[in-house]
Amino acid sequence: MNRQGKALGKLLIALVVLAVVVLAVAGVVGSNLNKRDTSGYSADLSGYESAAFRPAGNGFAAVSDVSCRLYGIGGEVLCTAARSYPDVQIATAEGYAAVWSEGGTSLTLLQTDGPVDISVVGGVTAADVNGEGTLAVLAGEVGYKGSVSVVAPDGTALYRVYVGSGYPLDADVSPDSRSVAILTMTAEGSSVLIYGVNSEELTAEYREEGRSCFELEYLGDGRILLLASDGAVFLKNDGKRLGSLSFDGGYLKDYGWGDGFAALLLGRYQAGSASCVVLTDTAGTPLKSLDIEGEVQGLHAAGKYLAVRCSDRTLVYDSELNELGCLESSVGIQAAMMRSTGSAVIISGGEAAVFEP
């Protein structure tokens, strides 16, 4: 899953989306791409030139001020919905995109069968969607700190838990849709509560005493990545701790995950614009790291590949951090979205093309 802004602390990890560039710059980028693009890829972005773009598996989602759209692997339009969401938030997975406004009372799920609108009592505070189209939706709730609902792709509510101890910041549904993990903040620190979707009983709990965590993610193998300002913790789905990684005085700029690994982009307070990409396995064991000079805007991982977007270039690596390709003169790129095929979709100036390293 890929998400934008869900809970407190999202400024720590939000990607910097560059403004749409002038046509001259877009032409230069397109020219460079065309030398390596033999896929015949074509995506109609008319009306979405200034949209927010998020990867959705091998496709992507585009959300403008008045409409949202889901694209497939070849750039084909899978779903379009005329919806207006101020302060738009987006969560995506292969074949799905959830769109909402923080505090709003509705959420739209884009999918190949058409858009589904879901009403949310109390206002959405965060949401996520997994690869089966199952949603976790956090909302305000009178008499409680909040609630978390698990919702099927057709909008049917499958499960709801009311959170009374600790404020819910984030929630994720497991890849198999059988459990939901909820991150809460308490006076003592942070807790992860894990419930079976078919049971109201708490099945597992993990606590980080004296530490403020701000986000969690189910990784592809069902393990859980828990993020704090100073490090990351890796959990099994039964709440047992597998390992942890310290940021060693750095700060988290972005993160992602692929097949069997997690990728963390760390900034250094005293190292100018230099950043470091750290790869771990899904138990938190460090695998590789790489320092990258220059201003790094973000990264995206898929399959066994990783795309790193800098202010002046876009780099593609394999899961061993071997450089596979570099797209130069990429100033003005709005999005660089890695695909599990090893190619990346590059969007610039309202145009999309495939970068084949």
Image (cartoon, grey):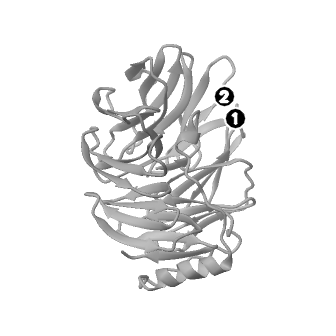
**Is 156 situated above or below 192?**
below
- Residue 27, picture quadrant: bottom right
Q: Quadrant of residue 124?
A: top right
In the picture, measured across the screen, residue 144 lies left or right of residue 67, that is left
Asked if residue 113 shows in the view, the reply is no
- Residue 240, image x, y percentages: 29, 26
User: Which numbered disc flags the more N-terminal residue, 2 or 1?
Assistant: 1
Task: Classify 347 as above or below 14.
Answer: below
Q: Pick the quarter of the image with the C terminus.
A: bottom left
Callout 2 secondary element: loop
**Regarding mark 1 in the picture, which secondary structure is present there?**
loop
Q: Where does label 2 land, which residue?
A: 140
On the question of residue 51 being in view, the answer is: yes
Give the percent coordinates (x, y) of residue 12: 54, 40
Q: Is residue 82 left or right of residue 254?
A: right
- Structural distance between the alpha carbons of marks 2 and 1: 6 Å
Q: Residue at x 49, y 54 (%)?
A: 298
Report which residue position mark 1 lands on. Answer: 123
Residue 278 screen position, x and y as percent: 33, 47
